[in-house]
Image (cartoon, helix red, strand yellow):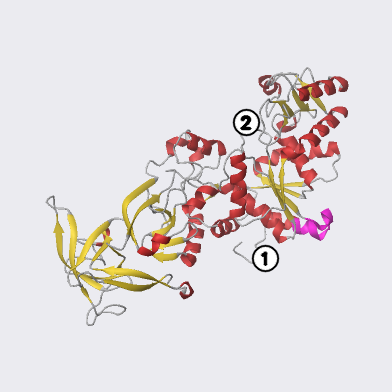
């Protein structure tokens, strides 16, 4: 986290836990859990929950479990489980126990038998459509199923036969017997088991009935001895059901469910269903596409664990949903990279410059600092030669007002190198500029020229000693701040969210770049080596964020 433990800002969850500890509730223990369903890759909203659950445990010398809610095998996979573990570890956290809801299939089944024996659950033959019709509305009570008054004996028999696989998928469900007139629709006899003949990634074909989330989650919490079950606000209306199940079963531990506002970041979506649609319909190049708000996508884009942790701490915790500006996330990553990213030079749209008075065949090795404020990061050797490359935008034949870069007859300083003057512009038959003829002042290495003031500084690379690279400039995936509010979120996609530059040249030191390092390309932005598409013979860099606040409006 960005703040020291004794300086952590207060929030309502920290206050609740502090009060519990002062009253010795739960014998002074704090045990939390992060319980994702492995049906997709984690996104930035999950990062907030991860930082909260693991952070609360760390702050209070407690424990945090990683538990996979794997009760819906049709949509889940081992791939997603592995990606979730990788993301939690990358963010800098370690779980005390690795658990699965499927670890508890047998006790969950026995608890269901207990509810039936207590007259608090029954087997229902209504279809899913009929159950919805019988449930009522927010203003009208529900209607009891004809099967609601089955005998305990009959319910036990039917449920055991469901378990044994005697019935077709959907033929029966097991429902909790609560209150069909409850103003909370979640309490109107919710289904707690359904028949599904689906191969499970961990239990194989051992089970053909699977428990529902609301039934499974609270019991899993109780089995694991969770003290504080922290979840987002959409589960607030489910809390009475959470408490009801545990109260009826008299579990030895009754965790406290506490809700907080989910993370809603502008220009993104955090619906797994919609993210999956982007992937499967190939609007993006996989779950780890750097335009995606997934943790894997952010990691590939060059975001750091520290920046994401700082972001989650900075936005805080509230009980009211609101939208977070993208600029807050961008500020966090710029702050981290400005302090820690190594500097390097890359020319994204090269313009050839021939230094006419520089000795033919000479190659000079210039020492340039890896970071202007952090001298402990040392210096690197950057080759300088007769032919260099600069950015096309760093030269203007007809300069705009206040232009401080290279013009015909004007001088500019090359970063960490000499002052050069443009003497002549070479064009092709179509009038396109293909080369600049310049001269350099050999007395200006590391010092200003005598008698004249040079205002502009531009970056460069040696043509012969630089390396070719592909550079990917990522822009926002959506054109509107709240794409989820659109009638069709796909209509809000930015068609220009990815700009690929294939003729770039980077300084020689970047030939040894690795995916763990982050770089500030001088005057251009912050970049990282792409972890997927780069190879020994191919350098691919992704832009993490621009140097200054604000994206160009596409």
Q: Residue furthest top?
A: 146
| Residue under pointer 1 | 5
Q: Is residue 20 magenta?
A: yes
Residue 306, image quadrant: bottom right
| Residue sitting at x 14%, y 56% | 427
Estimate the x, y position of residue 215 in percent, counting from the top left: 75, 35
As drawn, is 28 to the left or to the right of 267? right
Q: Secondary structure at mark 2?
A: loop
| Residue sitting at x 51%, y 59% | 332
Q: Residue furthest left?
A: 429
| Residue under pointer 2 | 74
- Marks 2, 1: nearer the viewer: 2
Q: Is residue 174 magenta?
A: no
The residue range painted magenta reads: 17-29
Residue at mark 2 to residue at mark 1: CA–CA distance: 42 Å
Q: Nearer the viewer, residue 237 or 4?
A: 4
Estimate the x, y position of residue 480 in percent, counting from the top left: 44, 43
Q: Secondary structure at mark 1?
A: helix
As drawn, is 2 to the left or to the right of 395? right
As drawn, is 247 to the left or to the right of 279? right
- Within 10 Å of the Cα at label 2, are there few (<14), some (14-19), or many (20+) other Cα atoms? some
Residue 9, image quadrant: bottom right
Residue 105, image quadrant: top right
Dot 2 or dot 1: first in sequence order is: 1
Total labels: the figure holds 2
Can I make out residue 145 in this image? yes
Estimate the x, y position of residue 169 in percent, counting from the top left: 69, 21
Q: Quadrant of the N terminus?
A: bottom right
As drawn, is 86 to the left or to the right of 386? right
Estimate the x, y position of residue 223 in percent, counting from the top left: 80, 43
- Within 10 Å of the Cα at label 1, are there few (<14), some (14-19), or many (20+) other Cα atoms? few
Can I make out residue 554 in this image? no
């Amino acid at each position: 986290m960005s703040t020291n433990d004794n300086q952590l800002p207060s929030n309502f969850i920290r206050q609740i836990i502090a009060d519990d500890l002062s009253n010795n509730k739960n014998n002074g223990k704090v045990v939390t859990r992060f319980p994702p369903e492995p049906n997709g890759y984690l996104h930035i909203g999950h990062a907030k929950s991860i930082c909260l659950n693991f952070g609360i445990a760390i702050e209070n010398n407690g424990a945090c479990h990683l538990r996979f809610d794997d009760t819906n095998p049709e949509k889940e996979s081992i791939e997603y489980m592995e990606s979730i573990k990788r993301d939690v570890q990358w963010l800098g956290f370690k779980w005390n126990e690795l658990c699965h809801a499927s670890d508890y299939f047998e006790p969950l089944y026995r608890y269901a038998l207990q509810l039936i024996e207590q007259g608090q659950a029954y087997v229902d033959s209504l279809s899913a459509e009929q159950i919805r019709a019988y449930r009522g509305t927010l203003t009208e009570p529900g209607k009891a199923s004809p099967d609601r008054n089955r005998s305990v004996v009959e319910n036990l028999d039917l449920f055991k036969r469901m378990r044994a696989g005697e019935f077709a998928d959907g033929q029966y469900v097991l429902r909790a017997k609560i209150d069909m007139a409850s103003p909370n629709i979640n309490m109107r006899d919710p289904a707690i088991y359904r028949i599904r003949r689906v191969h499970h990634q961990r239990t194989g074909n051992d089970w053909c009935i699977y428990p529902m989330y609301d039934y499974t989650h609270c019991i899993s919490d109780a089995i694991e001895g969770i003290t504080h079950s922290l979840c987002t606000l959409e589960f607030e209306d489910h809390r009475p059901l959470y408490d009801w199940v545990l109260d009826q079963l008299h579990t030895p531990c009754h965790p406290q469910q506490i809700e907080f506002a989910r993370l809603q970041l502008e220009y993104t979506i955090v619906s797994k269903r919609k993210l999956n649609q982007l992937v499967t319909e190939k609007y993006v190049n996989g779950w780890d596409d750097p335009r995606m708000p997934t943790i894997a996508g952010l990691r590939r884009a060059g975001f750091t664990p520290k920046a994401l942790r700082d972001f989650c701490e900075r936005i805080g915790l509230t009980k009211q949903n609101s939208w977070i500006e993208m600029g807050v996330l961008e500020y966090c990553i710029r702050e981290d990279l400005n302090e820690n990213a190594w500097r390097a030079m890359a020319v994204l749209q090269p313009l050839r410059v021939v230094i006419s008075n520089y000795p033919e065949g000479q190659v000079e090795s210039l020492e340039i600092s890896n970071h202007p404020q952090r001298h402990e990061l040392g210096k690197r050797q950057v080759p300088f030669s007769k032919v260099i490359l600069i950015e096309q935008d760093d030269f203007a034949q007809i300069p705009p007002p206040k232009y401080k870069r290279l013009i015909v007859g004007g001088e500019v300083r090359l970063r960490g190198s000499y002052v050069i003057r443009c003497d002549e512009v070479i064009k092709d038959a179509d009038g396109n500029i293909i080369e600049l003829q310049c001269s350099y002042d050999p007395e200006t290495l590391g010092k200003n020229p005598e008698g004249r003031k040079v205002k502009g500084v531009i970056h460069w690379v040696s043509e012969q000693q630089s390396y070719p690279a592909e550079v990917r400039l990522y822009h926002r995936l959506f054109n509107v701040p709240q794409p989820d509010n659109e009638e069709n979120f796909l209509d809000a996609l930015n068609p220009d969210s990815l700009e690929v530059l294939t003729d770039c040249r980077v300084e020689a030191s970047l030939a040894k770049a690795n995916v763990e390092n982050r770089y500030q390309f001088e005057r251009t932005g912050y970049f990282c080596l792409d972890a997927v598409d780069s190879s020994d013979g191919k350098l691919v860099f992704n832009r993490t964020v621009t140097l200054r606040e604000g994206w160009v409006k596409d």
